[in-house]
């Protein structure tokens, strides 16, 4: 049984004041939640505040949206895994399409980050997904396989338990246009096949695969009931505590025991 995981990617949003207000509402909304894993990845500037706010509830794990692969050094503007660990961060999102698109991140660079995160006991949410042109050319699985092979090079089979894959079709991110549950399930099962080749069938069955791309409270239930959709990575809808809590509840109600 895979435990569902719902993660919020706040991107470059949320001041400290907004973070506090979010938490007041969200904490109450999820007071009954028990059986799934919830992650919030705020901007770096809100990590400390959120780690203080969430410390008592123990219901939410902290995530970061990026990191550098070196532990320290002359890398102006960057943050290392060691620094994130100091703030009680448990997860780091790597390979998000916005980082690939706007900051030129390649599979090779993401691979270095993945290995560094795992070596520092950070869990990785690794994002993969095709562009609209690639989907229209029928190349989505080929693209995703290449990303997985490139980004996961050198990861040892036992380290796969610290990896979550987020399948995020680029054309669905922030566009309001989500993949249908069938399209998503089709790619998720292909991702699991590729993982089997990389790490063996048994391990691949344990790896959680999130769907991301315009997930909201209305489409979450149908997506999350698919057999290979083990959670969601949520951007826009995670900025509203009530909407995010509704997505958490959708995941809870589709969690098999
Ligand atoms: C994301 O940023 O990972 C994402 C899926 O964004 P949105 O939910 O806004 O499409």
Image (spheres, rainbow, N blue to C red):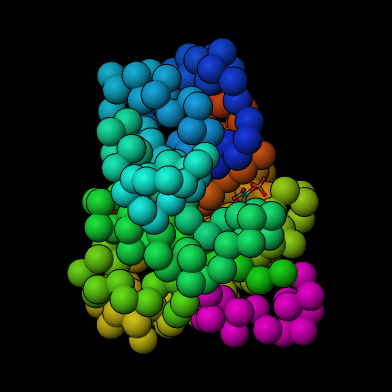
**In the image shown, does 58 or 222 lie closer to the viewer?**
58
Residue projecting furthest to the front: 74
Q: Is residue 245 left or right of residue 153?
A: right
Magenta highlight range = 132-148
Residue 240, percent across and down?
A: 62, 28
Vertical arrangement, residue 115 with respect to residue 7, above or below: below
> Is 201 placed above or below 188 here?
below
Q: Quadrant of residue 153?
A: bottom left
Asked if one can make out residue 49 in the rendered structure from this viewpoint, the answer is: yes
Viewed as shown, does residue 207 lie left or right of 142?
A: left
Instruction: Count all numbered tags in the image, as a single digit.
Output: 0
- Residue drawn at (53%, 81%), measured in percent from left and top? 146
Residue at (35% x, 38% y) in the render: 84
Within the magenta stretch, is there residue 135? yes
**Residue nearer the viewer, 111 or 97:** 111
SS majority, magenta? helix
Residue 77 in the image: above or below residue 192: above
Q: Is residue 7 above or below residue 129?
A: above
Picture residue at 28% right of the left edge, 28% below the top: 58
- Identify the image quadrant of residue 113: bottom left
List x then y, in percent, for residue 248: 48, 39
- Direction from residue 174 to residue 114 in the image, left or right: left
* Residue 53 shown in magenta: no
For the point 36% across and 25% down, which residue is it? 51
Q: Is residue 247 visible?
A: no
Residue 99 position, x and y percent, is 61, 55
Front-lying residue, 68 or 182: 68
In the rendered view, does 164 fall on the left or right side of 185? left
């Amino acid at each position: 049984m895979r435990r569902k995981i719902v993660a919020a990617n706040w991107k470059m949003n949320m001041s400290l004041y907004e973070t506090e207000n979010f938490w007041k509402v969200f904490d109450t909304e999820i007071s009954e939640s028990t059986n799934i894993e919830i992650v919030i990845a705020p901007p770096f500037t809100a990590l400390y505040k959120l780690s203080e706010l969430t410390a008592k509830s123990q219901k939410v794990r902290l995530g970061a949206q990026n990191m550098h692969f070196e532990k320290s050094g002359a890398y102006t503007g960057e943050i290392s895994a060691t620094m994130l660990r100091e703030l009680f961060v448990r997860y780091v999102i790597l390979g998000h399409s916005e980082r690939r698109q706007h900051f030129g991140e390649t599979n090779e660079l993401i691979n270095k980050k993945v290995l560094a995160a795992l070596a520092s006991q950070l869990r990785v949410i690794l994002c993969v997904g095709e562009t609209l042109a690639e989907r229209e050319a029928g190349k989505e699985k080929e693209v995703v396989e290449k990303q997985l092979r490139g980004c996961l090079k050198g990861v040892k089979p036992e380290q796969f338990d610290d990896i979550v894959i987020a399948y995020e079709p680029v054309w669905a991110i922030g566009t309001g246009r989500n993949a249908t549950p069938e399209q998503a399930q089709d790619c998720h099962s292909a991702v699991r096949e590729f993982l089997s080749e990389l790490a063996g069938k048994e391990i691949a069955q344990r790896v959680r695969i999130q769907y991301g791309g315009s997930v909201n409270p209305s489409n979450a239930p149908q997506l999350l009931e698919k057999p290979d959709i083990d959670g969601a990575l949520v951007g826009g809808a995670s900025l509203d505590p009530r909407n995010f809590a509704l997505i958490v509840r959708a995941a809870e109600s589709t969690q098999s025991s």
